[in-house]
Every structure is written in C-alpha cells, then in structure tokens.
Image: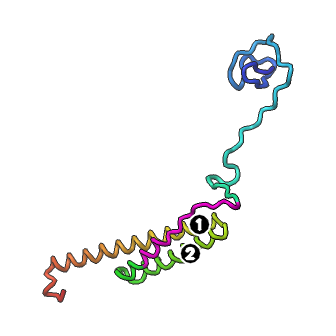
C-alpha cells in the first residue's frame, strides 16, 4: 500500500507509513500510477573525502610561501643562531616553494598544493628554530650580565 502523503510503498497490512508515520487506512484509494522506486541515499564523499574535483583549464590559487622561505633563509644567514639547521630548513623550503610554482604552472594543482604545504612546514620549522635560537642567545646574555660577565671576558 502506498502512502498518500509521501508515496512510500508500505506493506499491505500496515497502519502507519514506515517513512513519514502518516496514518494509513485499508480503504484508501491507491494512486493509479506506480510511484518511482525509492533510491538509497547517496554518500556525499564517495571517492575522496574533502578533496575538491579539479577541472582542466581552470586556474586555482595555490600559495607557494616563497617569500616566507626567502625571509627565513636570509634571517638564518644573518642571525646564524642554531648553526646551519635553520639555514638548511630555509633552503628546503625554497626548493619546495619552487616545486609548487612549477607544478601549478603545468596544471598539477594537487601536487602543487602538496608541495606548498611541505614548504609551509619547512618555513615553520626554520622560523621556530630561529626564534628558539634568538631566545636562547638572549637568555645567555642575561645570565652572563647577571653573573658579572666583565670578570669572565664578556
């Protein structure tokens, strides 16, 4: 028996609709046309969850973090706080940024996004090490001044 409210195909002896819970009476006139079969609900992310579908010919904005990579590398050259580690991380960030630019120019936006995210990670690590090194040097200078650094050659 079809529900007159929503069109759901219920059992013949049902008193309530299984879909909308409307009251069904056995003597209700049935629709002359058969209702379309119910489709199972489709999953919104069947293939790749949260991954946009890229279309050829459409230009997407992918940040490359090249400016930040250069700034962190130059600062690590000037400060040289924790030896060569921030400098090496900055160089890797520049390489990953250039890779993101190259992939974006040939239309590989997913590859460009991955390279840009890698560049961002390297920039964060290099900048964090630079900040940690600068804080460390400030602490060393404060301790040296507080302990009478003039006697020790500071």
Element at badge 2? helix
With 51 as the anchor, is 5 left or right in this view? right
Seen from the viewer's position, the closer of residues 39 and 17 is: 39
Q: Position of residue 102 (x, y in %)?
A: 61, 73
Seen from the viewer's position, the closer of residues 43 and 32 is: 32
- According to the picture, the residue beneath numbered tag 1 turns out to be 114
**Toward which corner of the image does residue 26 lie, by quadrant?**
top right
> Mark 1, residues whose alpha carbon is within 10 Å: few (<14), some, or many (≥20)?
some
Residue 78, placed above or below residue 131: below
Which of pointers 1 and 2 indicates the residue nearer the eye?
2
Image: magenta residue range? 56-73
Element at badge 1? helix
- Say if the magenta span includes residue 83: no
With 153 as the anchor, is 102 left or right in this view? right
With 65 as the anchor, is 43 left or right in this view? right
Q: What residue appears at the point 82 percent right and 26 percent down from the top-left corner?
A: 35
Q: Position of residue 88 (x, y in %)?
A: 46, 80
Q: In this view, which residue lies farthest toward the top?
A: 27
**Toward which corner of the image does residue 8 lie, by quadrant?**
top right
Q: What residue appears at the point 63 percent right and 70 percent down from the top-left corner?
A: 105
- According to the picture, the residue beneath numbered tag 2 turns out to be 98
With 79 as the anchor, is 148 left or right in this view? left
């Amino acid at each position: 028996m079809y529900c007159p409210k929503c069109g759901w195909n219920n059992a013949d002896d049902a008193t309530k609709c299984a879909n909308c819970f409307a009251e069904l009476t056995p003597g209700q006139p049935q629709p002359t046309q058969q209702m379309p079969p119910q489709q199972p609900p489709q999953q919104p992310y069947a293939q790749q969850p949260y991954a946009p579908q890229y279309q050829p010919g459409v230009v997407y904005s992918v940040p490359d973090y090249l400016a930040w990579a250069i700034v962190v590398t130059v600062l690590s050259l000037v400060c040289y706080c924790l030896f060569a580690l921030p400098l090496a991380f900055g160089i890797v960030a520049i390489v990953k940024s250039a890779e993101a630019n190259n992939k974006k120019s040939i239309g590989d936006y997913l590859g460009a996004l991955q390279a840009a995210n890698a560049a961002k990670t390297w920039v964060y690590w290099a900048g964090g090490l630079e900040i940690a090194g600068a804080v460390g040097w400030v602490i060393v200078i404060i301790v040296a001044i507080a302990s009478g650094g003039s006697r020790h050659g500071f």
